[in-house]
Amino acid sequence: MDMDRILEQIKDFDLNRAIARLEEEGHVLTQTEWIVLLVLAAAGLLFCFFGLKTARFWAGVIGLALGAAAGMAAAYFLGIDTAYIWIPGVVLGIALAVLGAVLRRFGALLTVWACVAAAGIYLIKPPTWTMAGICIGAGFVAGLIALKFTVGLTILGTAVCGGVLSGTAACFLFGNAGTVIHVAACALLFAAGLLVQLLLESRKRKRQSLKKAEEIRETQSTANEVERARELAENLDKIEEETEGRENPED
């Protein structure tokens, strides 16, 4: 594994330059660009319409990516040989992936953090690492708030990120349609995704309420049957006592 080459490619990657290339007039997509955009469009649609339903899966994926990046960066700055910096990255990545997939609130923190930060970086296109850090910090704050409002912010964050991702990928796949159509596509997908996720969550809660009501009815029914059985046993005891009293009158 040539880690030096991989690190150089990561450091040299410029998101703004990559997007500008796709936006160039008359640009013909390469096979690699087609595949990447199709994958991003599909992932964006899943994120947009089923973000909450698939939150544990995305939390695991995001935790793996964040942990790997953080572990490798920490090892790099600590001066560890670049041939081995992938080891702490893998360890931390797996740890965060497991925690994100198992712990619901922690998974919501990771998911919302990544969604808000990614959407902010794409929309603002920060020219410096300082601005990018602000976007990442804003995403982290949103993730902390998601610890309290888990469902609402997970739906909102995934709908925003999914709408921007799938809308942008679709616009590039079908040609550069212009800023107005680009923004409209992202906004339409965001609104549709938000509505679908809210409806799915509403139906889920309705089913849970019906199930809970059924359990309460069964519990009450069982309690009533027990009470009726107890009353019947008491009445039978009284009847037996009265019968014995009439058969054996006292002198």
Image: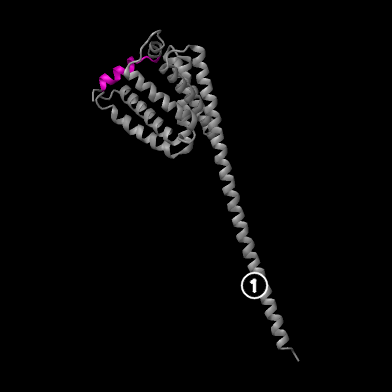
Image quarter in which the N terminus is found? top left
Q: Which residue occupies the foreground of this view, 23 or 226? A: 23
- Placement of 80 over or under 242, stated as above or below: above
Q: How is the image coloured?
A: one colour
Question: Residue at the spot x=59%, y=45% of the render?
Answer: 209
Judged by its main secondary structure, the magenta piece is helix
Residue 6 colored in magenta in the image: yes
Tell me, yes or no, if residue 145 can be seen here. no
SS at badge 1: helix
- Placement of 240 over or under 160, stated as above or below: below
Q: Is residue 63 left or right of residue 212?
A: left
Q: Is residue 69 left or right of residue 170?
A: left
- Placement of 229 over or under 214, stated as above or below: below
Q: Is residue 76 left or right of residue 136?
A: left
**Residue marked by disc 1:** 233
Question: Residue at the spot x=63%, y=68% of the render?
Answer: 229
Question: Residue at the spot x=26%, y=20% of the render?
Answer: 4
Residue 171 colored in magenta in the image: no
Residue that protrudes farthest toward the top in the picture = 25
Kind of residue at badge 1: Ala
Q: Position of residue 104 (x, y in %)?
A: 47, 38
Range of residues picked out in magenta: 3-15
Tell me, yes or no, if residue 191 can be seen here. yes
